[in-house]
Amino acid sequence: MQLRSLVRLLAFAPHFARSSAKLTCKCLAGAACFPDASTLNAFSANLSHPLITGQRPPASVCYPDDPDYDTSACSIAVANDGNPTYLASKINALQYTNFQALINSTTVEDCPYDVQPGATCFQGRVPPYAVNATTVSDVQATLRFASQHNLRLVVRNSGHELMGRAFGVGALELFMHNFDTMQFSDNFIPVGAPKNTPGQYAVALGAGVQWGEVFASADQHNRSIAGGLAPGGTVGAAGGWTLGAGHSVLSPFYGLGVDNALQFFVVLPNSSFIIANKYQNTDIFWALRGGGGPSFGVVVSTTVRTHPNLPYTVAFYTATGNSSSAYTQLLEVWMQQHNAISDAGWSGVWPFLNNTLYLTFFTQGVPPTSHTANATMEHFFAASKKIPGVDVSLAISHPYPSFQAWNEDNLVDSSKGFGFNFSALAPGAPRMAYSSWLMPRQLTTPTNAKTLAKIISNITVGLPFFVGGGAVSKVDPDDSAVTPAWRTTISDMNIVPSFAAGPDVDIRDVQKTAFDQIDPIRKLAPPPTGGQYLNEPDILEVDWQQAYWGRHYPRLLAIKKTIDPLDLLIVRKGVNSEDWDDEITCKTA
Ligand SMILES: Cc1cc2nc3c(=O)[nH]c(=O)nc-3n(C[C@H](O)[C@H](O)[C@H](O)COP(=O)(O)OP(=O)(O)OC[C@H]3O[C@@H](n4cnc5c(N)ncnc54)[C@H](O)[C@@H]3O)c2cc1C
Ligand SMILES: *[C@@H]1O[C@H](CO)[C@@H](O)[C@H](O)[C@H]1NC(C)=O
Ligand SMILES: *[C@@H]1O[C@H](CO)[C@@H](O)[C@H](O)[C@H]1NC(C)=O
Ligand SMILES: *[C@@H]1O[C@H](CO)[C@@H](O)[C@H](O)[C@H]1NC(C)=O
Ligand SMILES: *[C@@H]1O[C@H](CO)[C@@H](O)[C@H](O)[C@H]1NC(C)=O
Ligand SMILES: *[C@@H]1O[C@H](CO)[C@@H](O)[C@H](O)[C@H]1NC(C)=O
Ligand SMILES: *[C@@H]1O[C@H](CO)[C@@H](O)[C@H](O)[C@H]1NC(C)=O
Ligand SMILES: *[C@@H]1O[C@H](CO)[C@@H](O)[C@H](O)[C@H]1NC(C)=O
Ligand SMILES: *[C@@H]1O[C@H](CO)[C@@H](O)[C@H](O)[C@H]1NC(C)=O
Ligand SMILES: *[C@@H]1O[C@H](CO)[C@@H](O)[C@H](O)[C@H]1NC(C)=O
Ligand SMILES: *[C@@H]1O[C@H](CO)[C@@H](O)[C@H](O)[C@H]1NC(C)=O
């Protein structure tokens, strides 16, 4: 034996020892171990809605050879391919079709809408079985059944997640979208709180409620709430968003989603229905706040704080460089002011593409309650106007009586908006490759402005969220499971190589481009100083445990092993997934 092989063998010796034990696999649909029809019928009889069987990809209705072929159903499916509201309610669809496909280094098994003659609609990662859950008992029965039969179980809410964790090959899907209740309270007290604990303003959100509905309802109750932004308002409020951290343009005023979460109703992997808050099941409460869905149980409802319904001054800005050097200078001038603008009380988003930088920035009060807000923003406006070759086509501010008033005019009805047009430009269907990085404020200082401007000018499309700082930075980093990097970041850099990668390109190449474009930032601020928001994941991230959780990972792993010893709720790059293959089908060690 050559020396090199011997060294390699020795290096892997512990793995050989472990793998000599029987490797475990999940029991997938179609395999002999999968429950037979009568067992499935008995399970179905236990549910509020019949078990969905033989579920096919959404475009199957467009394939002449498919048993589901139906031309009118196909027209509807095609017309709604980019409609987030429609897709959120479709049990067999995700928001981005590439996560419905099974893609590895050698093979792509998908079911595209543009049907080529003779093409087959592959099942891909669309779960063949699904539970349309509407009760706690549905959730418990499903977890029990999946454990008993060693099934691959996936939990699906709005389907927005950017790494395909809500679907899985040969899986049983638990569809949570129909838990749609909202209960507002001005005197909420967590269960188990000591006597005389004062009540607070809060709302209990069912697992399927979406942010657009929450914003509208909160406004009707004359309250405000830190929630996510998306076209159609379709990102789920209580599920993946909160479980991963949850950022909002109101976070600098009110904290992250996890900082506002007061209580969870959750079904644990062993089917126990529990309440987790700061008085009971405190380890699980800590892990649910940032550990990522659905690793620590299936959430049925999340109770979050509501806040006073205040007016906002919103600054809108658009500037274009007539050359790449003018554009890079514009980015440099912006990066010089970046931290000062946060400290002056602003939050927002700063999308950039095609040599153009946009700002949509919020500060509380009309006029702003922060006395430095106006002058600091005006300083940036003025400095950027002096750059040769930069055309500042918009630099205004607009008063809104409430956050919802802004949301109505800029997202719900974008025709009344200013500046960056979320409806026209935000990531749309059908395919998506993504990357992101939490940039620590030590990186985004004026000293580094030139370096960062060069890196940023190299990124095709950026959608950075300026949602850290302020209240986010004041929370004890160990209070919840989110990476401590969240507490020192101001901008969460989000990038997409293109808004919706068409079928003509190989999505694996686009993923590689996303990884490469964020990489210089990743290298300047590696974990634990920087990190990645696990809800805005890079599918190629390598050191994901450190990137998502930093020093919190060991505690998360220990809790996970205690509450989910059967590995029922494991997802790709989720807590305790390291010994599983990428599809969470078989153990690799
Ligand atoms: C267009 C768009 C806009 C976005 N805007 C924002 C934003 O403003 N702020 C922000 O922070 N993020 C934003 N995100 C990212 C978003 O937080 C994630 O996509 C998140 O995972 C969505 O959660 P979901 O429950 O809606 O979606 P899903 O894809 O259905 O679920 C996401 C993950 O959570 C799990 N899960 C879902 N429901 C439950 C449950 N009830 N119990 C346990 N686990 C569950 C799923 O298994 C999956 O792993 C955006 C994403 C998109 C595509
Ligand atoms: C149906 O529910 C009953 C009561 O909870 C349980 O004992 C039984 O195992 C369930 N059957 C199936 C097939 O899930
Ligand atoms: C890729 O997927 C195909 C189809 O599922 C499978 O046959 C093949 O072994 C996979 N290849 C790799 C390298 O995982
Ligand atoms: C799922 O449940 C919802 C709520 O009860 C119902 O409106 C819908 O028709 C159901 N869908 C299917 C496919 O069972
Ligand atoms: C709504 O809340 C705001 C902020 O607390 C308050 O100033 C205002 O008076 C309230 N409006 C109504 C109609 O109650
Ligand atoms: C960006 O520029 C390219 C090339 O000029 C153009 O095709 C594309 O439509 C532009 N994108 C946007 C969103 O303006
Ligand atoms: C950009 O604008 C500057 C200043 O107006 C001008 O000197 C320069 O020629 C322009 N460059 C291009 C490429 O248009
Ligand atoms: C600053 O205040 C002036 C005067 O009220 C106003 O015209 C301008 O739009 C404000 N700028 C910002 C960025 O809020
Ligand atoms: C934004 O884009 C949408 C969709 O293309 C369009 O309907 C709307 O009018 C646009 N808004 C503005 C202010 O241009
Ligand atoms: C810009 O991208 C190119 C091509 O990917 C790369 O060679 C170069 O180093 C990048 N520049 C910076 C500053 O990141
Ligand atoms: C379910 O798991 C929780 C957390 O590990 C544990 O406290 C509880 O005793 C378990 N319940 C049952 C019935 O085993």
Image (tube, helix red, strand yellow):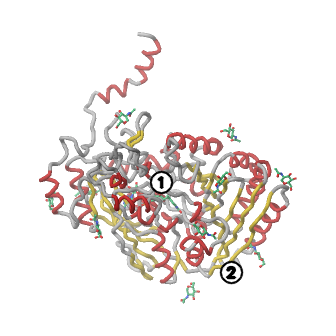
Residue 82 in view in this figure: yes
Query: In terms of depth relative to the viewer, which is nearer, 206 or 201?
Result: 206
Query: In terms of depth relative to the viewer, which is nearer, 284 or 351?
Result: 351
Question: Where is residue 237 shown, x and y percent of the image?
Answer: 44, 66
> What is the total number of numbered labels drawn onto the structure image?
2
- What's the amino acid at mark 1? Pro
Question: In the rendered image, which residue does mark 1 sit on?
Answer: 430
Query: In terms of depth relative to the viewer, which is nearer, 3 or 452?
Result: 452
Question: Where is residue 28 shown, x and y percent of the image?
Answer: 26, 44
Left or right for 181, reference 132: right
Residue 565 in view in this figure: no
Can you tell which quarter of the image residue 405 is in? bottom right
Left or right for 111, reference 452: left
Compared to 408, does 472 lie above or below?
above
Question: Counting other residues with Cα less than 10 Å from the Cα at mark 2, is it few (<14), some (14-19), or many (20 or more)?
Answer: some
Question: Where is residue 366 shown, x and y percent of the image?
Answer: 68, 80
Q: Depth-wise, is mark 1 or mark 2 nearer the camera?
A: 1
Question: In the rendered image, which residue does mark 2 sit on?
Answer: 366
Left or right for 488, reference 149: right
